[in-house]
Each structure stands twice: as structure tokens, then as C-alpha cells.
Image (cartoon, helix red, strand yellow):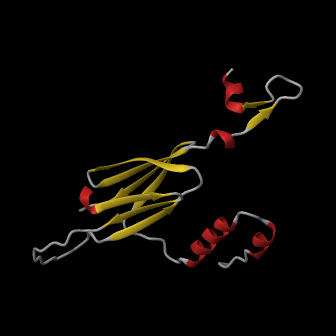
Amino acid sequence: MRNFDLTPLYRSAIGFDRLAQMLNDAQRSDAAPSYPPYNIELVSDDQYRIVMALAGFNRSEIDITFERDSLQVVGRKEKDTTSRTYLHRGIAARDFEQRFQLANHVKVTGATFDNGMLTIDLVREIPEALKPRKIVIDGGPNVTALEQRQAA
């Protein structure tokens, strides 16, 4: 069973249309991109790392764009004017475009490129207004952040 009917979700859930659209898109794309190879790591509760193997690329050929809820990594290989005869060609070194859909409040904190490995660090920063709060009944200040209470 590969097809899912998301109609009930549209009828009863408000504001989840982006999630439903992502599920539909994932269902339609049969093959996951295999080039370039990459890992997605969970570093800690709110920190993530994407590591991409980009053999044959240099920094000037890689472009990283972060826009709201999308991270795009593009590699444009400079054309080699040298004529070569390959007996075996196992290193692809071809142009690529890889997109990652990011959850709300996930931000890119940095990127490094070392020995053909591109590392992109991400962190989830939940705004103070969206963090859970403890409501005090018949007490002084009515609302206190849970982190402040746990720290005491």
C-alpha cells in the first residue's frame, strides 16, 4: 500500500496543509537523491548536522542558501578543458542540487568544508513566547517560564 488518502486530514486539521503537502511530495518522488551522499545527524536535542561528501569540489563551486524553511545546497563543477581518457570513472563530480525541508524555528548556524566534506550545523531555537509556561494559581507573578522554575 503506497498511496495514502489525506482527505480526512484536510477536513479536520487546520494549519497542517504544509505537512500534508510534504507527505504528498514524498509519496510522489519514487527515488531519493543518491548524489551527493550525505548524513543527517542529531547532535543534541536541538542541534543537527548535515555532512555531505563532495569529492572533487572546492569551496568556490558550492553555494548554500537558507530561506525560511528550506536549505538548498548547489554544486556547480567548473568545466575541465583537459581531454582525458578514463578506464574507469567512479568519481562523479557532476553538478547537483540538494534541498532539505526544515522544521519551524530551525536555523543554520554555520558551514565548514574540509577534505571534501561539507558540514552544515543547524539549531532549533524556539522563541521565548512559544516555550511552555507554568501558570501559578492565586500567586504572585501569574506566568513563569518553566526553565526559570527548573533552574531555581
Confirm whether residue 54 shows in the render: no
Q: How many marks?
A: 0
Is 104 or 28 nearer to us in this picture?
104
Q: In the figure, is residue 66 to the left or right of 7? A: left
Q: In the figure, is residue 112 to the left or right of 109? A: left
Residue 67, position as x, y percentages in the image: 48, 59
The residue at 77%/65% (across/down) is 13
The residue at 53%/77% (across/down) is 29
Q: Is residue 6 above or below residue 66?
A: below
Q: Is residue 96 above or below residue 125?
A: below
Residue 136, position as x, y percentages in the image: 83, 29
Is 149 or 27 nearer to us in this picture?
149
The residue at 89%/26% (across/down) is 138
Is 36 or 64 nearer to us in this picture?
64
Residue extending farthest to the front is: 141
Q: Can you say which quadrant of the picture contains the N terminus?
A: bottom right
Confirm whether residue 103 shows in the render: yes
Q: In the figure, is residue 113 to the left or right of 133? A: left
Q: Can you say which quadrant of the picture contains the C terminus?
A: top right
